[in-house]
Image (cartoon, rainbow, N blue to C red):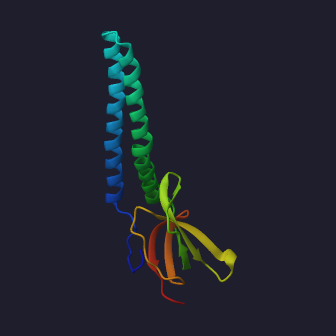
Amino acid sequence: MPGNEANSLYTTQDINRALTERNKRIVLAAVMMALAILCIVIGALIRNKPLMMIGPSVFGCLFYFLWEFKAMPYARYARYLSDINTGLSHETEARFVSMSEQPRLNNGVMYYDFIVSVGSEPEDERLFYFDADKPKPSIPEGENLSITSFGNYITNLETAPST
C-alpha cells in the first residue's frame, strides 16, 4: 500500500489466519473421509450393498471437493507467506503503469498483475504480482514507487520521492 509505511504488507497474523483456516478445512475433509470409511464398514457388517457403494461415493466426492477447493488454497497461501518471510527480497524503484482489474491465479494464489516501469522504454516495464487478499491500492499512473519484492511478488509497497 502506498505511503511511508516501513512494515511489510504481511504480518504474523496473516500466516496464522491462513494456517487456522487450512486446519479447519482439513479437519472437515478428514471427517468426510471417515464417514466414507464408516459407510463401508457398516455396509459390510449389515450386508447392505447400496450403503457400501453410495456412501463412500458421496463422502469421497465431498472429501475431494473440500480438500482440493477449500483446504489446498489456504495451504498454498500459507506456503507463499512462509516463503516470502524466509526468502530473499530486493528493492525496486519504479513508476506505476497499471494494475489489472481482475485477479488471476498464479501458483495456487490469487494476484493482481502490477506493472511498473524502471526506465523510459517499453521494454523497461516489469510485471509484479500484488496479493488479491490485500486491499487493492489506488495509485495514480506515473507515481514513483519503492517496491520490496520476493521474486515478482510484492511484499511492501511505498511511495518514493520524486526524482
**Which quadrant of the figure contains the N terminus?**
bottom left
- Position above or below: 70 against 116: above
Whether residue 67 sits left or right of residue 90 in the image: it is left
Q: Nearer the viewer, residue 151 or 44?
A: 44
Answer whether residue 92 is visible to the viewer in this image: no
Q: How many numbered marks have been drawn onto this rendered protein structure?
A: 0
Task: Identify the residue shown where x is 43% and y is 56%.
Answer: 81
Does residue 149 sit above or below 140 in this rendering? above
Residue 25, compared with residue 115, is above or below; it is: above
Q: Is residue 82 visible?
A: yes
Residue at 39% of width from left, 68% of height from top? 135
Counting from the top left corner in percent of width and height, residue 28 is at 32, 37
Image vertical order of residue 36 relative to residue 88, above or below: above
- Could you tell me residue 154's position as x and y percent? 49, 67
Residue 27 shown left or right of residue 103 in the figure: left
The C terminus - image quarter: bottom right
Could you tell me residue 79's position as x and y percent? 45, 51
Furthest-bottom residue in this view = 163
Q: Residue 142 placed where, x, y %?
A: 54, 84
* Relative depth, front residue between 64 and 75: 64
Q: Give the residue displayed 43% in from the left and 59% down from the top.
A: 85
Tell which of 126 and 111 is nearer to you: 111
